[in-house]
Image (cartoon, helix red, strand yellow):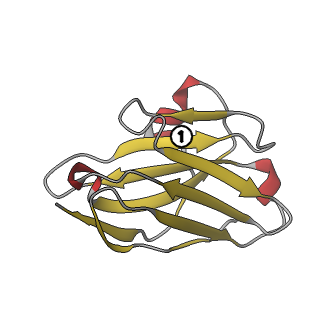
């Protein structure tokens, strides 16, 4: 069982930065691929990116590539999402999730077993 708690969301102007954190409980955090997803009002949840349990492989959606960075520290049971050059279209509820999978399927929600409650990110123009 893994419990996930996100933090770090807020209101930021376009061009600004935010760093989201996802703290995990449980001793097996290092066994899980961690994904970040977001859902804007009226839209489906979409993948932002993912990081393999070892931390040596990452995936990013095209919409955030070059602006967002995912990192993790297994000793701290924490994964981060550094978001730079934020745009109004990045406004959404951001959630972290855990899965034992590392494959092209990390982009889909149904492979993830555990989810955090989400944190709101609002980017003003």
Is 20 left or right of 26, judged from the image as shown?
A: left
> In the structure shown, which secondary structural element does the residue marked by tag 1 occupy?
helix
Image quadrant occupied by the N terminus: bottom right
Residue 2 pos. (x, y %): 67, 66
- Residue at 86 percent across and 65 percent down: it is 75
Which one is nearer the viewer's eye here, 106 or 83? 83
Q: Residue at x 43, y 62 (%)?
A: 17
Q: Would residue 122 be found to the left or right of residue 85 on screen? A: left
Q: Residue at x 67, y 51 (%)?
A: 71
Most extreme residue toward the left is: 42
Q: Is residue 33 above or below residue 22?
A: above
Residue 122, given in percent of the width and then of the height, sits at 27, 67
Q: Is residue 68 left or right of residue 85?
A: right
Give whichever of 5, 82 is nearer the camera: 82
Name the residue at 81% across, 53% down.
30
The mark tally for this picture is 1
The residue positioned farthest toward the top in the image shown = 104
Q: Quadrant of the C terminus?
A: bottom left
Q: Position of residue 10 (x, y in %)?
A: 36, 75
- Would you identify the image quadrant in which residue 52 lies? top right
Q: Residues within 10 Å of mark 1 (few under 14, many from 20)?
A: some
Q: Which residue is label 1 attached to?
A: 111
Q: Nearer the viewer, residue 95 or 57?
A: 57
Instruction: Provide residue 12's location: percent of width, then percent of height.
Output: 31, 70
């Amino acid at each position: 069982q893994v419990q996930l708690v996100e933090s770090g969301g807020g209101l930021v102007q376009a061009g600004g930065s935010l760093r989201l954190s996802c703290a995990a409980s449980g001793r097996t955090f290092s066994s899980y691929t961690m994904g970040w997803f977001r859902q804007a009002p009226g839209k489906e949840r979409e993948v932002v990116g993912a990081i393999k349990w070892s931390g040596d492989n990452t995936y990013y959606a095209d919409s955030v590539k070059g602006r967002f960075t995912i990192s993790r520290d297994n000793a701290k049971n924490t994964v981060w999402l550094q978001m730079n050059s934020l745009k109004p279209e990045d406004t959404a509820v951001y959630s972290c999730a855990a899965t034992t999978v590392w494959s092209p399927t990390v982009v889909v929600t149904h492979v993830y077993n555990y989810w955090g409650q989400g944190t709101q990110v609002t980017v003003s123009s």
